[in-house]
Amino acid sequence: MHNLLSKIDSGEFVRDFSLGELKDLADEIRDVLCNLLSDRTAHFASNLGVVELCLALHNVFDFRRDRLIWDTGHQIYPHKLITGRYHEFKTMRTKGGLMGYPNPHESEYDLFMTGHAGSSVSTMLGLRSGDELSGEEDRYAVAVIGDGAFPSGIVYEALNNAGGMKKKLLIVLNDNRMSICPRVGGMATYLDRLRTNPFYTGLKSEVVKALSKVPLLGDPTERFLAQLKEGIKAGLHGGMLFEDLGIRYIGPIDGHNIAVVRKYLQMVKTQEGPVLLHVVTEKGHGFQPAAEDPVFFHTPPAFENNNGKAVHKKKGSSKVFTDFASEAIRTQMQRSERVTVMTAAMCQGNKLESIRNEFPSRFFDTGICESHAVAFAAGQAKAGLRPIVDIYSTFMQRSYDQIFQEVALQNLPVVFMMDRAGLTGPDGPTHHGVFDIGYMRLFPNMVVMAPGDAHDMTQMVDFAIHHSTPCSLRYPKAVAGILPGERTPVELGKAEVVHWGLDGTILACGSLVSEALEASVLLREDGLDVGVVNARFAKPIDRDIIRQAISETGFLITLEESTLMGGFGSAVLEVVCEDGLPAGNLHRMGIPDQFIEHGDRAELLADLGLNAAGIARTCRLAATSTADLKQQHVIR
Ligand SMILES: Cc1ncc(C[n+]2csc(CCOP(=O)(O)OP(=O)(O)O)c2C)c(N)n1
């Protein structure tokens, strides 16, 4: 059925394709994309939008030598399909299968493993400069960046550098007017103005006609581009921002017209110095439901493609931690007009849409600008507000220095809500939020919490809003239950005993408390009475409970969905060392010092021994070594 795709085993193939073949190939790619999601969730609308752009790029450049970086990388599927990965494509985002982002282990055509937005222009500039220094200046360098990623601060650092270095390179700005949600901010308005440029609207067909008469190489192209540039300048001042930075602005052009995109790419290839080609595309192009609702179809739940209609599967109705987080934020915003909330372009993922509508003046979407969001929140806190920064754990890493300097060092009461903390599943190593306990607990003044269930979430947000220093909460992409038994109020640095057992204690931090409880049920069947403590705080940590568990129960196991190095278990070890407690039967369970691949979260947890069965296994071993230890004691 996919006559062309099935024969392509390298990006090289597409270089010789005729325009007609490229168009047929575009249809085949769309067909594959539109049927991929029948049994999984994956990035969808963004990929549909770049099909023609991707084909034109691979047709004009030779990316075995030339350099191509897709910013963020979520729109990499067409590129994967035409660089030899068609036959494995159905394994996309499953464990052991293709990654949903660029992956150099899969192909020489993927240069960096990415998933975080905004770094493409920098790495591409570095590649260009590195190739020049290595005497390989014939290698062309291209970055493709969406208008949602474009406002990231790092992009301006790179543009500034590129304008100054005057290197020969190409930035393709893929403008579909969308981030995940509609794009926001001043750059969005600026790009809208450029779109209304007569070059794109009225003059487009004449320009295309003129272009077809211009030889593609040599002086005439230079002259033509110079005229074009002057024409734009004289007209609506299109692209002056870039021109003034030393980057030649060309466009906007229609990104779904392969012939036009190809022609422009051939032209810019002959240009010296940095060029920004503004390409206009439609997110979800070619599948009507996605084009009409690109927010929903950014990463939609599984659906069948029924002749261009999306037929959705029944969804489970269990509430996840994010639901409780957003409810808790709403409650605080209703209670006090001083409470504000920030998202960095993740309004939908953070389930903040209804809060945005209910409190438009206290809801702030900064765009994909996490470091700015944190410093911005610090300013608000200084002005007397109680800002909540709601950002995924992995993306919060972008704002590390602002957490340090603008928040912790000033001891400002900013609340950090770190969603998707832990293994995020099919997105993989670029998105697992496994470092935050380590990086947050390093800062003086910072309180580090992890709700064990939905009840904790509400209590902790309330606690954080009323606390006088910065606070962070981490919670996973998982269903949030309610722990059994009578609950204790959230109190600074105090853990909560869910069940006390004499044979051993599992001290679980956050997301894995429920797995620990299941493990303790399994262990009871073996005659072992193992207790479970909901740690609640990684900082300040409950020293008393650690001492009590070590002295009164057979063993102590720390459990976390986070890196062992520097994480919660490390914090416990620090206490053990400082307080001179015996560490002989202390075991830490968590994520080892390696990057974890993509796959279903439950599968990944099981592989790491972090599910109920794995925890029970470790407890049995700990119980045996406790018995051994006692034995040795008696013998001595
Ligand atoms: C640093 C960072 N923050 C947030 C995200 C989440 N994210 C993934 S794609 C995306 C939107 C990107 O928009 P754009 O670059 O315009 O691409 P489009 O999907 O519109 O093609 C966002 C916010 C991310 N990947 N990286």
Image (spheres, rainbow, N blue to C red):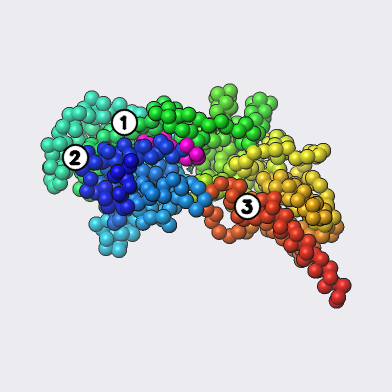
- Tag 2 secondary structure: helix
Local packing at callout 2 (Cα closer than 10 Å; few below 14, some 14-19, many 20+) is some
Q: Position of residue 257 (x, y in %)?
A: 26, 34
In the displayed structure image, the side of residue 578 where residue 10 appears, left or right: left
Residue at the front extreme, as displayed = 1
Q: Position of residue 527 (x, y in %)?
A: 82, 55
Q: Nearer the viewer, mark 2 or mark 3?
A: 3
Name the residue located 27 percent from the left edge and 63 percent from the top edge.
Answer: 135
Q: Taking the image as drawn, is residue 271 in sight?
A: no
Query: Which quadrant would the N terminus be assigned to in this image?
Result: top left
Q: Are marks 2 and 3 in contact (CB under 8 Å)?
A: no
Q: Position of residue 24 (x, y in %)?
A: 27, 38
Residue at the right extreme, as displayed = 634
First of labels 2, 3 by sequence position: 2
Label 3 beta carbon less than 8 Å to ligand 1: no
Q: Amino acid at mark 2?
A: Leu
- CA gap, disc 2 and disc 3: 58 Å
Where is mark 2, residue-wise? 225
Q: Reply above or below: 7 against 483.
A: below
- Tag 3 secondary structure: helix
- Total numbered circles: 3
Where is mark 1, residue-wise? 194
Q: Which residues are magenta?
A: 38-49
Is 43 in the magenta? yes
